[in-house]
Amino acid sequence: MLAAMEDAPSPIYCLVAGGRTVWANAGARGLVTDGGELPLVAGRPLAELADAVIGTGRAGTVRGPLAVGGPAVTVALRPVRVAGEPGAVVVIEHDDPDAVPGRAPAVDAVEAAQSSLLPPFLPMLPDLALAGSYHRATSVRAAGGDWYDAVPLGDGRVALVVGDAVGHGVAAAGAMSRLRGAMRSTVLRDPSPAAVLAGLDSFAALMDDVEGASVFYGVLDSGTGELVFTTAGHPAPLVVGGDGSAAFLPVTPRPPLGSMPGAGTPVHRFVLEHGATLVLFSNGALAGSSSDYAVALERLVSASQEVLGRPGAGDPATASGLAVEIAELVRPPQDWPDDVAVLVAHRRATAQEPLQLDLPAVPASLPGIRRRLTAWLTELGMGENDRVGVMAAVGEACANAAEHAYRGREPGPMSVRAAVDPDGVLTVTVHDDGTWRAPDHDPGDRGRGLLIMRQLVDGVSLDDREGTTVTLTVRLRRSPDAPPTPGNGAEGPVIVVDRAGVRPVVRADGAVDEAGADSLRIRLLEASHGGTARVELDLREVTLFSSAAVRVVLAVARIARDEGWRLVVHAADGGVTRQVLEVSGLGGLVDLR
């Protein structure tokens, strides 16, 4: 709760009698003078207004200018117990948020709503590189409603969708969310383009805010390259060949969703060749100052050819940025009148070969396995966080084989094999010809090594009938690259593991948001060997500690408790991060220092 309040656009104070500030969020701290004085509202000190509420125990509201000649605000004051004594919570709302210098909350609200409703990740398939990006319009009056999605269907097939809901703002983002939900619900029953478009048509006819939305929907088989697709009031998709040629696929014009019952569903087929790229886009990609539609199409073609013609553009490690780069070339950073959503599907010219390593089961073999597997996973395009987790799990399986498989006799062979199936599931097997032996300290499920591995990957199985085979599985996925936000230079947190002391210390610096929380989880599990070894967490340099980060600390603290140790967490006294941890009830699970 405190993390959410810290980032809230409205200044929030927790005050006690005399105007003493017990807690204030970032917006409120910015209003305090260098001398520590609270602002004036309607000519009255905020401390005086709070004292009146504390004295009477009754909530109040005051409207007027903030400071002398400042913007008009509404101040809500509510009596509460603060730090064990009578106090007040004070919230300052600007009557015209867009007029506040340096801030555009209405635009931020639209972008936050839109981004939260777009897919949090895209599937990674061995034969296909997917990339998605959403860029909002410059003006809040034109922002919201464009969307994309990619839904894995099994057998190497994926449903690709780009659409544009009617209207703008948060309402359009809500309509987009309902349309995307209806699409996914229909896809689960029958993913064929005819069935999905018919379902969306029926849904749109019942929902006024969805009626008139445009959409592209297609099913792409990553193995054969066959694309079966349909459109409703939407521009034709673009295909850029491996030789740089570009052409828009022919489509049969069809009215937008729900606007003409019985309009039919024209279905088209196309084969995407190896090395070719499908570029899907919303109507906003064709907007701009020019009234010539042909010029807008040519601009999109040129941008796509420039990006996709760069050396290594379709490589797994760099493909995630394709949609962002195309959208940035199509849409200049200033004065763009509409949202832009871009979804790119690049069919790889060659598939990555499985990895096969055969080495003696001795500790000296482990560094070579780490080097070879790290290079293979990097070439696959796996993100660092997921790669670290897989490497730690495989390292544990190999270490178990090297230390226990041939105990009491000459070391034998050990093999490591890694491959990705058509649906993007990575499977790594570690096999030895020795015998499985549960350790003396058994935490309840065939040994401590299995516990560590299960914390780091999606699935772990063990077969000890003919030697020992440990099988690890991870579904590959990639977070869409986010475009740069004007005026927002914030970067992700820096999270490192310091091993110089008695025990590892995971140090975080910066804003630990939802994406940063995943990095924090991997580093904590890596440093603690899946929660089985003591580790400390240093949060003293953290500027934002999100609810996602709180969940990570809770999860690791529970694992530590089950393993008989307590997680030590360092957080500055009186800081927001420490308040977040205490409010979250972590005091009973961790040692706060």
Image (tube, rainbow, N blue to C red):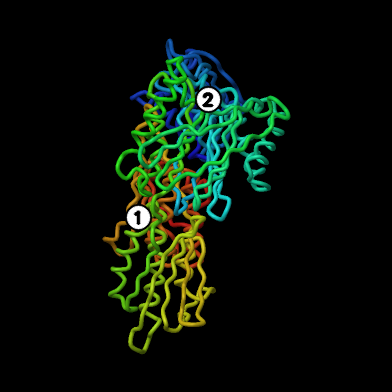
Q: Given contact means CB atoms under 8 Å apart, are the residues at marks 1 and 2 in contact?
A: no
Name the residue located 43 percent from the left edge and 57 percent from the top edge. Answer: 591
Q: Quadrant of residue 58?
A: top right
**Distance between the alpha carbons at the discs numbered 1 and 2:** 57 Å
Is tag 1's residue or tag 2's residue first in the polypeptide sequence? 2
Local crowd size for mark 1, using a 10 Å CA cut-off: few (<14), some (14–19), many (≥20): some
Is residue 475 depicted above or below 137 in this figure? below
The secondary element bearing badge 1 is classed as helix
One can see residue 11 in this view:
no
In the depicted view, which residue is nearer to us: 451 or 213?
A: 213
Task: Name the spot of residue 346 as percent of width and height, x first.
Answer: 43, 44
| Circle 2: residue type | Ala
Task: Name the spot of residue 569 as percent of width and height, x first.
Answer: 40, 54
In the depicted view, which residue is nearer to us: 32 or 505?
A: 505
| Circle 1: residue type | Thr
Residue indicated by mark 2? 50
Is residue 316 depicted above or below 277 in this figure? below
Name the residue located 38 percent from the left edge and 86 percent from the top edge. Answer: 407
Residue indicated by mark 1? 378
In the depicted view, which residue is nearer to us: 186 or 565?
A: 186
* Mark 1 or 2: the one toward you: 1
One can see residue 227 in this view:
yes
The secondary element bearing badge 2 is classed as helix
Q: Quadrant of residue 418?
A: bottom left
Q: Quadrant of residue 68?
A: top left
Task: Name the spot of residue 353 as percent of width and height, x first.
Answer: 39, 61
